[in-house]
Amino acid sequence: MMNQSQFETLFSTCKDYIENQDWVALKRAIVRTPSLKTYSNGDDSLLVHAIDIGPNAVRKSVGCGISPNIRYTDGSTMLMRYASFGDLEMLQFLLRNGADVNAIASNGETAFSWSCFRDQLACAQELYAHGGTWSSAFQTPVELAESSNASQELIVWLRKILE
């Protein structure tokens, strides 16, 4: 069995695999040590490291078995981040690969609410189509969109789906 120091060394080595795009070695390490799939040390995880490198590294890392549901310290997920950025392609990729569409961050928000707050209509529509729900305890979707100066197009769409 591996001690914590050995695990941290392996975690660091896996980050190097991602940086060097050595997907075979990363997959081998994950198969041998499955806990790497979901391991997070604060805001540091293999998936977060892949994001720093770029979308292809995220795709390849998830393809190697890294969970798309790893959490940041604030409870947010990659899906929430990409919904907020308006990156529809990465959002769709994460959904196809098991991202939890209704994961709730520490502040009570979901990816759907993040997309509405950031005026990302296409992402909000995609999340809604995949069963994305609203979980803000503070405001309705329309109130949140209006308070964040979202486009009229998003506000009208929200009103339509909430009727």
Image (tube, grey):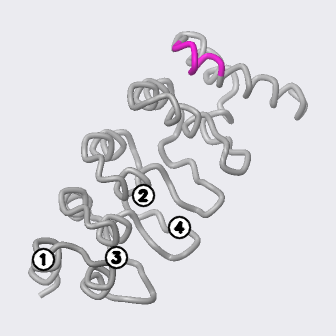
Please state which amino acid type lies under the numbered disc 4: Ala
Residue shown at the point (18%, 57%) measured from the top left: 122
| Alpha carbons under labels 2 and 3: distance apart | 13 Å
- Foreground: 5 or 65? 5
Please state which amino acid type lies under the numbered disc 1: Gln
Of the two numbered discs 2 and 3 in the rendering, the one whose residue sits closer to the viewer: 2
Can residue 41 be seen?
yes
Q: Quadrant of residue 110?
A: bottom left
Q: Quadrant of residue 18?
A: top right
In the picture provided, is 151 more to the left or to the right than 53? left
| Alpha carbons under labels 4 and 3: distance apart | 12 Å
In the rendered image, residue 69, in percent from the top left (x then y), is placed at 50, 49
Q: Residue tagged by mark 2?
A: 80
Tell me whether the residue at label 4 lies in contact with that at label 2, contact meaning CB atoms closer than 8 angstroms: yes
In the picture provided, is 60 more to the left or to the right than 33? left
Q: Circle 4 sits in a helix, a strand or a loop, which is it?
A: loop
Q: Give whichever of discs 2 and 3 has the lower sequence position.
A: 2
Magenta range: 16-21
Q: Is residue 20 located in the magenta-colored stretch of the structure?
A: yes
| Alpha carbons under labels 3 and 1: distance apart | 19 Å
| Alpha carbons under labels 4 and 1: distance apart | 27 Å
Tell me whether the residue at label 3 lies in contact with that at label 1, contact meaning CB atoms closer than 8 angstroms: no
Q: Residue tagged by mark 4?
A: 105
Q: Is residue 95 located in the magenta-colored stretch of the structure?
A: no
Tell me whether the residue at label 1 lies in contact with that at label 2, contact meaning CB atoms closer than 8 angstroms: no
Numbered circle sitting on residue 152: 1
Q: Circle 2 sits in a helix, a strand or a loop, which is it?
A: helix
| Alpha carbons under labels 4 and 2: distance apart | 9 Å
Q: Circle 1 sits in a helix, a strand or a loop, which is it?
A: helix
In the picture provided, is 21 more to the left or to the right than 125? right
Q: Residue tagged by mark 3?
A: 134
Q: Circle 3 sits in a helix, a strand or a loop, which is it?
A: loop
